[in-house]
Image: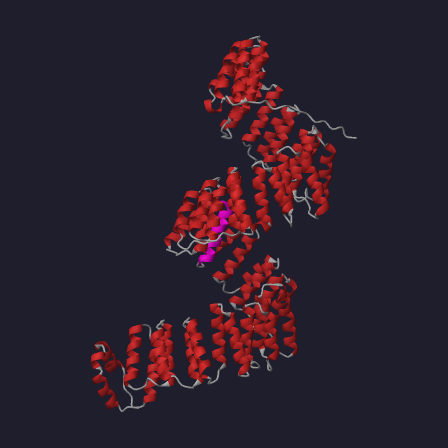
Amino acid sequence: MYPISTGITSFKKISPLFPIKCRALFFSKLIIPSDSSILAEKLVVSLERCDDVNSLKKLHACMLIQGLETDTFLGSKLVNTYASFGLLTESRSVFSRIINNDLSLWDSVIVGHHKAGQFDEVLRVYLDLRHRKIGIHGSAITFTLKSCIHLGIPEFGKSIHVDIIKFGLNTNRFVGSSLITFYSTYRAMTDACKVFDEITERDIVTYTSLITGYTQTNDHRAHEAFAIVHHMQTENLEPNRVTLLSLLQAASQLQLLNHGELIHAYAKRRGIGCDDEAFQTSLMDMYIKCGSPNKATIVFHTMRIKSTACWNVLIANHLKSSQPFEALNLFSLMAQKGHGFDLITLANGIISCANLGLLMVGKSIHGYIFRHKVHLDVVANTALVDMYSKCKNCTKARKIFDTIKDKDVISYNVMITGYLQNGQAHEAIETFHNMRRLGLTENEATILSIVSAFSDLNDIRHGKSIHGYVITHGFDSKTDIANQVMYLYVKCGYIDYGRQIFDGIRNKDLVSWTSMMMGYENLGHVYKVINLFQEMQKENELNPDSVTLTCLLQAFSQLGHLTKVKEIHCHVIRSSMENNIDITIMNSLLTTYSKCGMYKAANNLFHNMKKKCIVSWNTMISAKGMHGDCLESLALIQEMKKENIFPDDVTFMSALSSCSHGGFVEKGLDLFRVMKEEYGVVPKEEHYGCMVDLLGRAGQLSEAFEFLKCVPSSQSGSAVSALVAACRVHGNSEMGEGLGKWLLDFDPENSSSYGLVSNMFAENQKWDEVACVRTSVKQRGLKRANGFSLIEIDR
């Protein structure tokens, strides 16, 4: 050690190389003691408090001046401090000066580099240590193994295992625990168990490492964690907080509620985790995943201090359970109690609004984010895009989407889905192309959305292209995607191609069978629908849902198979669908009974339904009108009013049609007025046509013609057709011929209009006009649809 005077002289000699500020720091702040150990201690404290690079370099200069650059402890602190600032060149330079065979120095440097996040440097130092053959310590192994995990280099970790065996450290419990963690990370539990077996004196940390390893594998072997803890207790080792946390995770994965409850009871008896936020949050998560959300709520309410993470777990649970209203209530309660929001909380609040379609509440959360200048991550921004898309504001969703800097495939999927939900298939496809240009790889959800977009557009040419892409990239083995491609072909009218894909699906689910059945039903191949359903029952143990049964009912309805309809009704009752209020299938039964002439059965079914929706009421109103029970049809509208169910345009259409067939002109006119004035329903072309038909059937042609004048020209096609038909029935050829010519000019592609006008001219023996009309039909290549009837005699 240099004398103090020599140190000052040396400082004067190097003063041209030293900043003036550093000299001032050295003389004013550094009190030079007579004992070098005291000086080293002061430098160590200064290094620990150092918060900028300039101060660090000044302290390094002081060490050089005092001749402390070779001090092992002080040098290791300097190496690690340089590493924490990312100055690896300086760190290596200092280390090369103090390097020796002191293993504690090497351990300190490795630990320092790991804490600084310099994992590559940890591996480099370890290799240098191995090359020098001076031995190895447990801490160096532990942090080098951790660095291998961070860098994703399992082979390097296995080579460290060789060193462990070479130095006889494989029986060391500290080293063994690190190796178990390493192998568990890569799901090599067989190797982890071998390491565990070689450890001679196992402690709670060793056992917990293996238990945690099994819970992190996320497979069926998580149950082995409970067998290990049982063995641990036979060696008089009791689980600690970390052990219980891992066991709770295992119970969550396996959905073992009874195991989770036992862990909870053990923790209560031992007083473990009573006020521990992480433990109680894990308890809540376990109860939720094991299907006992009420117990999770109880744990939540018993917590003295409720952190944001706990609120997030409970809110996320309600979202996963399809309870967005309850999730939003918790979000509001959290705000009322003054709890701070993190990004997860805000994202969950936005998702709740998206699922409920509450645009204004979603905007208020967005406003909060804007006012408090919260920097959103990709997840929260994507939630905003989803919320605006589901609330029918794709323009705003797109603006937010464009502001996301690091877009991922999930962000693109949400934007594409948003466009599809709003009927903008072209924009969805363009967004997909933009994603591909950025080099992002699509996933299954992306492919499903794009196939759906081409289905919406009936674009079979591009649909075939995406089908080829699905095959070449191996997506055709996915049942969901195969179902969507099949639906594309079926929807575009290529039923044979759809059947080929259907036959090629290995693991057909209910969607596969139902989609194919619906394709046949839409094209009128009703016998194939029935055959396919019978085949499904023979080959699979799939229980038909409401969609399948609805498709089957439509097929039986077209064929008039009343017996089969009754069988489906019996199946519905036996399978308790009726008790579960499956309104879709009940409405289908109503429609089928009505179309098949079983009015009493439809009426009884309607009045026995425990829950009715607007479709149920509309179906029954239409059924009563079809069977000439007009007054009862109108009475149902009044009953709807009592039940606080507001009629829609379909309701009034069915009721007006009943008035038309029953000849109730005044009631029909009054109903049309009520529709507009009391309920604010805007009349459509069908409503205008029905009103003209109502007046025309009653022979009030002049009134019908005056009404027609008030009809918007763009919606007058049905009304004109109805009046022409009425003129033909009542023999007013002058008005009928004039309207007929206008009708042909208004809708020249409608073959039924030509037939109506031609028959009217023929009845008045105007054969030249008939010939002209038929010539126009031939020139335009129009064809009339043939009528047919099906009658089944039940025996």
Image quadrant where residue 12 sits: bottom left
| Residue 367 position (above or below residue 111) | above
Residue 411 horizontal side relative to residue 774, left or right:
left
How was this image coloured? secondary structure
Q: Which quadrant of the figure has residue 627?
A: top right
Q: How many marks?
A: 0
Point 63% across, 72% down: residue: 228
Q: Residue at x 51, y 39 (%)?
A: 461
Q: Of 448 and 601, which appears nearest the observer?
A: 448
Q: Residue 524: give x, y in percent of width and height.
A: 64, 32
State the image coordinates of residue 778 (x, y, percent, origin top left).
54, 19
Q: Which residues are magenta?
A: 342-357
Give above or below for 583 relative to 132.
above
Query: Compared to 19, does 329 lie above or below?
Result: above
Image x and y of residue 117, in percent: 42, 70
The quadrant of the picture occupied by the N terminus is: bottom left
Would residue 353 be counted in the magenta stretch?
A: yes
Residue 617 visible in the picture: yes
| Residue 444 locus on image (x, y percent) | 54, 51
Instruction: Quadrant for the C terminus, please.
Output: top right
Could you tell me which residue is drawn at 54 percent across and 77 percent down?
161
Instruction: Give the main secondary structure, helix, strand or loop, of the magenta stretch.
Output: helix
